[in-house]
């Protein structure tokens, strides 16, 4: 009888460990260790607005600069993006379909390599927390994975922006959509 109870307790312990690992997230890290998560992505539109002066006809084009980071020169689209940033500075990003959305090379990856930048400040001065700037190459279909550590671990991130950037000219191609009000526990 004692042997059966011992086996049952051991089995329950294994099941609870597997269930906990399924809730934890990447590499067994608890959601409590998560600083910020992103679910969804927005491709870059290089121009944020165009203003035509009604009197003079002068045209002003404003670039889509995000927290001091310049946009790519062409439209880019992204099918999906998920990212987790942990309190120790680890970051995991999964992107699908990051491809040119215009021009003669539409639907291609332009042989780009990308890295991630997290910016936590809502107003300047902005601190860019980057993964390795040499980046990871985009697959032909625009898919990519970044498993890295930020240059420094932020203590808090009250206004998170995640940018996916070119390892070449460091312009941004896509941005993550922050997950808010998420409750996975």
Image (cartoon, grey):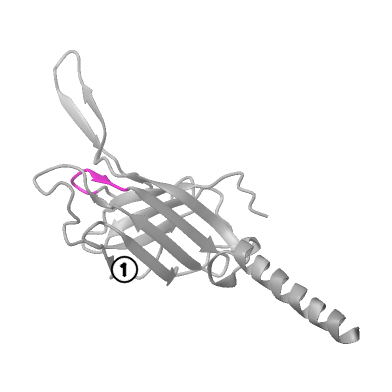
Q: Residue furthest bottom?
A: 3
Rendered location of residue 170, percent (x, y): 26, 59
Q: Within 10 Å of the Cα at label 1, are there few (<14), some (14-19), or many (20+) other Cα atoms?
A: some
Determine the residue positioned at 72% across, 69% down. Answer: 16
Residue 68 visible to an observer of this rendering: no
Residue 17 to residue 108: above or below:
below
Rendered location of residue 8, percent (x, y): 80, 77
112 sits left or right of 153 in the view: left
Closer to the camera in the image, 122 or 136: 136
Q: How many marks?
A: 1
Closer to the camera in the image, 97 or 16: 16
Q: Residue furthest right?
A: 1
Rendered location of residue 97, percent (x, y): 29, 52
Which quarter of the figure has residue 116?
Answer: bottom left
Rendered location of residue 160, percent (x, y): 49, 50
Q: Which secondary structure is most common in the magenta stretch?
A: loop
Determine the residue positioned at 17% across, 53% down. Answer: 108
Which quarter of the figure has residue 56?
Answer: top left
Secondary structure beneath dot 1 equals loop
Residue annotated with mark 1: 133
For the magenta stretch, what is the residue range?
A: 72-78
Magenta run includes residue 27: no
Q: Residue furthest left?
A: 104
Q: Residue furthest top?
A: 55
Residue 66 visible to an observer of this rendering: yes
37 sits left or right of 62 in the view: right
């Amino acid at each position: 009888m004692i042997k059966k109870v011992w086996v049952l307790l051991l089995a329950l312990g294994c099941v609870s460990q597997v269930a906990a690992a399924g809730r934890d997230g990447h590499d067994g890290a608890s959601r409590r260790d998560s600083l910020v998560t992103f679910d969804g992505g927005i491709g870059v539109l290089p121009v944020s607005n165009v203003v035509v002066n009604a009197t003079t006809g002068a045209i002003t084009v404003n670039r889509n600069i995000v927290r001091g980071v310049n946009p790519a020169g062409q439209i880019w689209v992204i099918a999906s993006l998920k990212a987790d940033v942990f309190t120790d500075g680890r970051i995991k990003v999964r992107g699908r379909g990051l491809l040119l959305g215009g021009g003669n090379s539409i639907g291609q990856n332009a042989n780009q390599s990308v890295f991630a930048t997290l910016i936590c400040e809502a107003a300047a001065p902005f601190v860019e927390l980057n993964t390795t700037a040499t980046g990871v190459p985009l697959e032909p279909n625009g898919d990519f994975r970044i498993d890295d550590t930020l240059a420094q671990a932020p203590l808090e991130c009250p206004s998170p922006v995640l940018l996916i950037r070119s390892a070449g000219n460091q312009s941004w191609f896509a941005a993550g959509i922050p997950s808010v009000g998420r409750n996975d526990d």
